[in-house]
Amino acid sequence: MPPKAVPADSTTVVNPETADVTSSDVCGFVCGDTVVAARDLRVRGKVVVRQGGSGYVVGPASSSGRICVQFEQREDQSDNRLNCLPDELRHTLAGGYLAGTRVRCNKALDAPSRVVIPAGTSGVVVGPARDSQFQRLLVRFALHGHEHVEEVACDPVDIETNIPGNFRRGNAIVATRDLRVGGQVVVREGVLGTVVGPSTSDSQHRVTVSFSHREDGSRNRLNCVVNEIKLYLAGGLEVGARVQAVRPISYDGFAPVPTGSVGTVVGPAIDEPLARIVVRWDSASPTGTPPEREAHSDDVRLMIAGGFRRGETVLAAKDLRVKGIVVVKQNVLGTVVGQSSTDPAGRVTVAFARREDGRSNNLNVVPAEIQHMPCTGGLVPGDRVAALRQLLVVPKGAQGVVVGPSCSQSSRVAVRFSSQESSGDKEGGEDV
């Protein structure tokens, strides 16, 4: 006697002795496909297979439209198979991908129609490519503003998971603000973390992150929206920052990048991402030399509009207004944070000691709106000076130019020496 039909809204236990098994295709699933549970599966209200539980397709169930699956582990310790609805299952594919995963190709791919799909094109995993080994994936790519679609059989190494914010698995990140769960701070601003991948609950807008420290002591990962985290780069730099080489740079066997070369930070280096960065240099590279080169964070300095330096103390040159309202009074002290992220070449981000509106936000100002703090001893930036005695590696008598007050101590002066015996920016340890 055949088993009873099951309601369309329930997952039901199947007796392995009586379950109907054929090799027919059911909603894209065929006998032998490896699958995972797309959500918790219940029988009579009790969870018997947890979301993510893996198993394999035995065949179509006797119930119309259902699939018979043997799961590796069940919460009720039963060995029975389950008749599942198609939307309760997801394919487990080569490379660990799942059907529906958003990906991008990491190299140019040739489509069956002879169209070339450029590297970086986004797509969606449809399922397994029906080759003899099931070692490839069928990916649907949208081209030309989604006007044209191509389905391509890809090797797992041809693609990578598309993570919101253009993050990549393993990227080091920091929290951009205090992160809260249920109103309680669980991760403090500035805490380091590692990108695990896209959030399974909201893969288009959230990123799953494993933080190095949580205030509640939990080791659980957090699903963060992209503006709650930012890529960690050595030296406190950011993607898009304009930098200048302070010495010849060569890590890769190519001709060195000359001192004084200017470029844009692209991201962290693949090797040693916590110490090195990748810079796209403006100057034309010799034949065969890539425009993007790796550099240690100490090999470059941040270029800030107006010649200001990170950490430098400045004064508001006039009343500063936002939407016509004065938010910072003239002569209020501030500290240079760095380049403006919205206009790196034209604006400076400053943290002022006091704002009239009571807020603590930084301000992005044009260089004319702030001025250098006067140096001790009546010196001003641009004054030419000479060392009165040996200063670390700077010999007595070396000539230099005053850069401004020292970022570490206002009673000291930062001087750029140009003698042959020294190089780079040297902060004099001598009162002037």
Image (cartoon, rainbow, N blue to C red):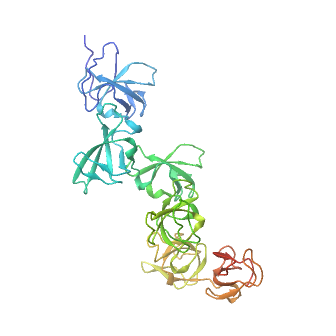
Position of residue 411 in the picture relative to residue 373 (left or right): right
At which x and y percent is residue 311?
Answer: 61, 72
User: Who's the residue at 44% across and 50% down the image?
Assistant: 207
Please tell me whether residue 64 is drawn above or below residue 375 in the rendered image.
above
Nearest the eye: 84 or 195: 195
Residue 201 image point, x, y percent: 40, 44
Which residue: 53% across, 60% down?
253
Of residues 37 and 233, which is closer to you in this image?
233
Residue at horizontal 45 percent and vertical 71 percent from the top: 282
**Residue 65 figure quarter:** top left
Is residue 24 visible to us here? yes
> Residue 128's image quarter?
top left
Residue 204 position in % (x across, y down): 37, 50
In this view, the residue in front, 112 or 264, is 112
**Up-down relation of residue 248 to residue 227 (above or below):** below
Residue 40, position in %: x, y? 40, 32
Quadrant position of the N terminus in the picture: top left
Task: Name above or below for residue 160 compared with residue 9.
Answer: below
- Asked whether residue 45 is in view, the answer is no
Q: In which quarter of the image is the C terminus?
A: bottom right
**Is 173 in front, or is 154?**
154
| Left or right: where 123 falls relative to 192 | left
Find the residue positioned furthest to the front: 287
Q: Looking at this view, name the residue that lies furthest to the right.
A: 389
- Give the tally of numbered discs: 0
